[in-house]
Image (cartoon, helix red, strand yellow):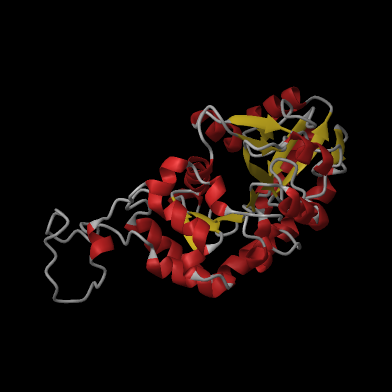
Amino acid sequence: MINFNLNNLIRDNIKTIKPYSSARDEYKDITDGMVFIDANENPFNTDVNRYPDPQQTQVKKRLSELKGIPTNQILLGNGSDEVLDLIFRVFCEPYRENIITLPPTYGMYDVLANLNAVENIEIELEPDFQPNIEEILAAAHTHTKLLFLCSPNNPTANSFKAKRIEELINEFQGIVVIDEAYIDFSKKESWLSRLDEFPNLIITQTLSKAYGLAGIRLGICYASQEIISVLNKIKPPYNINQLTQDKALERLNAMDAVGNEVKTIITERKKLRKALKSIRFIEKVYPSDANFILAKVDDANQRYQQLVEQGIVVRNRTNQPLCDNCLRFSVGTEVENEKLIQTLTNL
């Protein structure tokens, strides 16, 4: 990227903000026998009567071991949505600046843009669901701060070509956010391996998908130390509760189990794609690098309702750009997938 200066991208009020300092930020040495009467906590032990570690030290340490990224380049959020919201608040001045998204894509980018009073410039993907580099760069101007690339993409399930992503990172004069929520289901390499090459790159991941922890709400942000330090200035002081930290650490220490589940999902995905192609009213089954499959049917509204009546809920994406009459099928267990195929066959 040419002449990248992070300070020029950060909102002026964020540059000067003084972050809140919690009790556990000021005193971190938690050892047995210490008497803690500094945080106005209930002194009676309930296992969760104390505030959680505001920096999630142990979880970050384990992620650092697994991903090869230093802990000072990791930020955790209450779900990826909190991470994304923090990014908006650091870089985008309300009513003045804008972002670029590539529909069809994850709907929260647009919701967060509206929430933060930031214009969302939408550049539709090409028919093969790849970014249109020429249109993206032509749409960007001095007030364009963020470019969101969801890869593998939701709802299309495909990964963006590495050469196109690299060109966008190098040419876009702002922050490029690559959302890798589904990267564990892809053969493509995560951009984490090249994070240090690009000072304007932010990568988000999650424990909700491959790790099976959607219920604990834990999102992960990887970026340069400089970007992470700015995001830390504005995050809530105890944004990740103790129960979430404990459960996350437990799962991160069970990577063999996680890996086996991912392999099973990928195997089931392959079987499900093959079976979907045999359904008479399914016109196209798109390739998938995620834990779901997008398929074009004859009448998405009708087929969606028929499935609901049979006790199966899928996602109707027909109102999304380039997704006319498309349904999205999450890959379930072997039993769930067999029930889905049998039901579709009988419709």
Residue 95 spot, x, y in % from top left? 53, 27
Residue 8 spot, x, y in % from top left? 56, 47
Measured along the vertical axis of the image, is residue 301 above or below residue 85? above
Horizontal relation, residue 43 to residue 152: left or right: left
Residue 191 spot, x, y in % from top left? 68, 61
Tell me what residue is drawn at x 40 percent, y 70 percent.
Answer: 58
Measured along the vertical axis of the image, is residue 197 above or below residue 201? below
Tell me what residue is drawn at x 66 percent, y 47 percent.
Answer: 336
Where, quadrant-wise, is the C terminus in this rendering? top right
Tell me what residue is drawn at x 26 percent, y 68 percent.
Answer: 28
Where, quadrant-wise, is the N terminus in this rendering? bottom right
- For the question of whether residue 279 can be seen, the reply is no
Measured along the vertical axis of the image, is residue 120 above or below residue 85? above
Horizontal relation, residue 209 to residue 48: left or right: right
Horizontal relation, residue 113 to residue 284: left or right: left
Of residues 271 and 129, which is closer to you in this image? 129
Measured along the vertical axis of the image, is residue 38 above or below residue 275? below
Residue 133, quarter of the rendered image: top right
Tell me what residue is drawn at x 46 percent, y 49 percent.
Answer: 215
Residue 242 spot, x, y in % from top left? 33, 58
- For the question of whether residue 195 can be seen, the reply is yes
Of residues 163 and 208, which is closer to you in this image? 163
All told, the count of numbered labels is 0
Of residues 339 and 205, which is closer to you in this image? 205
Horizontal relation, residue 90 to residue 34: left or right: right
